[in-house]
Image (cartoon, helix red, strand yellow):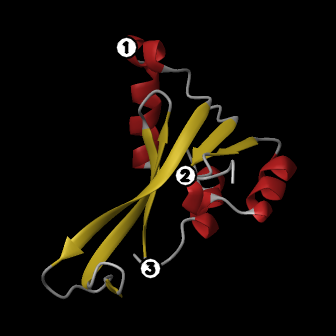
Amino acid sequence: MALAQVVNAISQLDITQAWGEGKSSNSDGQRFAMNRKVLQQTYSPKFNDFALEFYSFVADNYAPFYSLPIECTDRDAPYVLDGLRYNESDLPLEEHYTDTHGYTENNFAAFAMLGRKFSPRIRKLHK
């Protein structure tokens, strides 16, 4: 609830209105390599190290409205709906963007059922 209050306050600032109305959002994972063992870290054979990953959601007015720790080896797609479903702020989110890792056919269907637009940026779509 505290994050929702911060997001609502950010959305009321004049400067954020210049960036966007809070109607679209984006989500992506941020990976942090860890030298020490901590509870929520996973070994990544791709990078040959241990890491934490935070999957974060940001509105077009740059308000970060949701974030969750995930396994660094997981694909982003299962978590795309979490930010929109668990968002407690007053943002009028209508459209959501992800990268290729957030794309699945199931997400298209789920967004349609929720009355929202899903717009993934799919790498090598032309192929």
- Seen at 55% across and 52% down, the residue is 99
Q: Earlier in the sequence, mark 2 or mark 3?
A: 3
Quarter where residue 19 is shown: top left
Q: Is residue 109 left or right of residue 72?
A: right
Quarter where residue 83 is shown: bottom right
- Seen at 41% across and 19% down, the residue is 16
Query: Looking at numbered disc 3 in the image, what kind of residue is underneath it?
Result: Thr
Hey, which residue is sitting farthest left in the picture?
Answer: 35
Q: Earlier in the sequence, mark 1 or mark 2?
A: 1
Where disc 3 sits, the SS reads loop
Task: List the residue tagged with mark 2.
Answer: 99
Task: List the residue tagged with mark 1.
Answer: 15
Hey, which residue is sitting farthest front in the picture?
Answer: 127
The answer to whether any part of residue 90 appears in the image is no
Q: Residues within 10 Å of mark 1 (few under 14, many from 20)?
A: few
Q: Earlier in the sequence, mark 1 or mark 3?
A: 1
Where disc 1 sits, the SS reads helix
Marks 2,3: beta carbons within 8 A: no
Task: List the residue tagged with mark 3.
Answer: 73
